[in-house]
Structures are given as structure tokens and as C-alpha cells.
Amino acid sequence: MAPGLRNESPAARQHPLTGALVPLPPHPRSRLLCSSRQLEQSAMARATSTALLLLLLTVAAAGGRVARTGSGPPLAGNAASVEELRVRRKTAGNGLGGTPQMGWNSWNHFSCDVNEKIIRETADALVNTSLAKLGYQYVNIDDCWAEYNRDHKGNMVPNKQTFPSGIKALADYVHARGLKLGIYSDAGTQTCSKKMPGSLDHEEQDVKTFASWGVDYLKYDNCNDAGRSIMERYTKMSKAMKKYGKNIFFSLCEWGNENPATWAGGMGNSWRTTLDIVDNWESMTSRADQNDKWASYAGPGGWNDPDMLEVGNGGMTEAEYRSHFSIWALAKAPLLIGCDVRSMSQQTEDIINNWEVIAVNQGKYSLPLTCP
């Protein structure tokens, strides 16, 4: 059976900080624990202590052992056969995204108020807190990083006020710390903020620019589309990425409008399955539910993306944030921190550095959970 299609979990995992081998609970069966709907039905879902996370892990451990070899059936709740999964699992072929991406993104906390000082300090914080050692490797700049207009050659230009040193120097800084730099653009005439140009009809030029700067990740949004189809616009950028950006992780963000899980696997490394998340329980759980139905389309090389993490931004309780992080981990969703890691609380740090939960998300021989 092909790697990535087996219902298999390692018996133990090396602790990323101490190096010790620590036994892991078996990967839970989806019929016992998967979507926010089940969590909402439980009084524990609104608990105000760490009891919820303990409940999640307890239920996971009680769920019965999964097959230790590739001879067993797909995860319970995944209706597709292994052969169907093979057909569905087209990948971009760039060798990236073997596991869901981990890192940080500027948007959820800073919106357009982002600058190179924040990016540098965030990279430093990821290293100093040891989050980088746990796998949080991408430092992603979202919208608003560029000037309103392109230069006389048609190139995007970093904002002279907020990114005076340029993106290349910033990428060098991030790379020197063992991390990777991500950037943002849009499959339209302007980005969603309308403060900088999009990449529509500049796909190859922009990918060449990003590659020349040393960018490692592209989030590609879906605003201001000029009335042109999603398929046309994202296909053009995918082709440009395969030609000039082979080492750049390609994250499609078309908000799940046209069921990208069914077609984006051959274009990029992840695809949004939902509209933007908001920092509250209702938004988080609805995104989890919307994402759930596409579980069988995800796997090594391409992942469903229910949007970035809100943990630490203040809109949910500690238990709700623990639920949020655990659900994203179990769903094999990207773990992209969305808070200010420079000043996060110890409570927030304890949630996002839980390496046992991270290990479930990053396990290489299991599929996302889905609800029966």
C-alpha cells in the first residue's frame, strides 16, 4: 500500500527537545472523536481547565488500536476505498507538504499593521521559545506588504515605509535562523485589502520575483477577480509556480467556493476549504465542520486548510483554544499560529507547543479524521 494511505501510527516518537523516545497513544478512530459537533454536545467543550484536552487524549486512547500494517481498511468514517484515494490524491509534484505545514502568519493578529521589525522579532521568538524545534518553520507575511503600484518594469515593490530593507534581506534574516519566509498575493487585480496589486496576468513575473528574493511559501488569495473564473486564475498561477517556483510551497486560498479539495491537489500543497476564521467558538467549530467532509482528499503533498489558528488572540476560553488546536491537529490541518508569539501568555505557549498533539498532526502514516 502506498505511503500516506495506511492507517498506521508509530508506537513511540522521539521528543523533539529531549531526544527521549516517548510512547504515543494510537491514532483515534474518527467515529469516536472528530468534529466540533461532538464536542459541542459535551459539557466538557466549555470547561475552563485542561480537562478537555485530557478528555480528547483519553477518548483517543480508548478508541481501539488501529492497524499496524497497511493491510487494514481506511480510517472509519472515510468512505472512499484505497484505490479511490489513490485517484483523488493527485499532488503538485514539488516534493513539498509531506506533512501539514507549520509556522506563523501575520493576518489574524496584525491584519495590515505588519512590518519587517515584527517579522524579524517573530522569527527570533519562534527560535527562542523552541517552537521552531517543534516544526513551526514558516514565517508568513500576509496582505499589505507591498506598495500600491508596481514599478516601471511591472514588478511588485515592498512597501518603503514598512519593509524598507526589502523582502530579500528579510528572507536572509529568517533563513539564518533556520526558518522559512512566506509571502502573500492574490489571484486578482488587487489583494483583498486593496492596498497592493494582485498577481492576475503577472503570474510568471511575480513568481520569478518571489523566487529571486528567496521566498519559501506563497499564500494566494481570491479577491478582485475581474470576473474571471477561479479555475482559470489558479491554473495560471499553478503553472507559473511549477515553472519558476518549484521550491515554493503553494497555498491556495479560494475559500472553498468551488470545492478545491476535488481539483487543487494537482495545483498546490494546500487549499482553503472555508471562508476566513473569526476568533470565537462558533466560527471555529463551523470551519471544522465545513472542512470535515473533504478529509479523504488530503494527504502527503496536499492538505485541506480550514484557515489559520486563533489560539492566543483572546476571543475564546483556554478550553476552547485547546479544542481548536486539537481539532486542527486531528484533521491534519495546517498549524499556522495566528497570535503575537513575541508576547504570548504561558497558557498559549503551552497549547501550541504540545508536542504530543503536534505528533498526531505530523504523523506521516495516517489520514485526517472524518466524521461518519
Image (spheres, grey):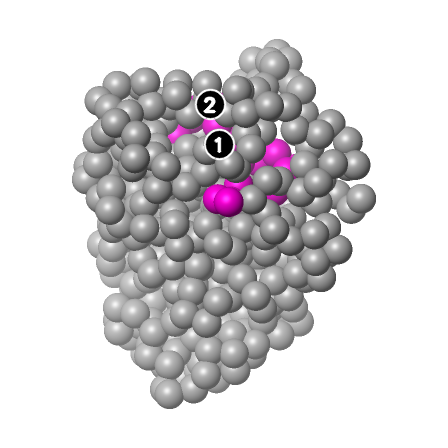
Q: Residue furthest left?
A: 315
| Residue at point 36%, 26% (across, down) | 351
| Residue at point 61%, 14% (across, down) | 23
Total count of labels: 2
Question: Which label is found at residue 92?
Answer: none
| Residue at point 74%, 36% (across, down) | 72
Q: Is residue 196 above or below residue 304?
A: below
Q: Amino acid at mark 2?
A: Val
| Residue at point 52%, 20% (across, down) | 62
| Residue 369 counted in the magenta span | yes
Q: Residue furthest bottom?
A: 227
Image marks 2 and 1: residues in contact by CB distance under 8 Å: yes
Q: Amino acid at mark 1?
A: Leu
Q: Is residue 53 above or below residue 300?
A: above
The residue indicated by pointer 1 is 32
Front residue (pair 28, 234): 28
Say whether disc 2 or disc 1 marks the residue closer to the N-terminus: 1
The residue indicated by pointer 2 is 59
Secondary structure, mark 2, is helix
When asked about the image quadrant of residue 261, the answer is bottom right
- The location of residue 361, given as percent across then percent down, is 53, 36
| Residue 229 counted in the magenta span | no
Magenta residues (range): 352-372
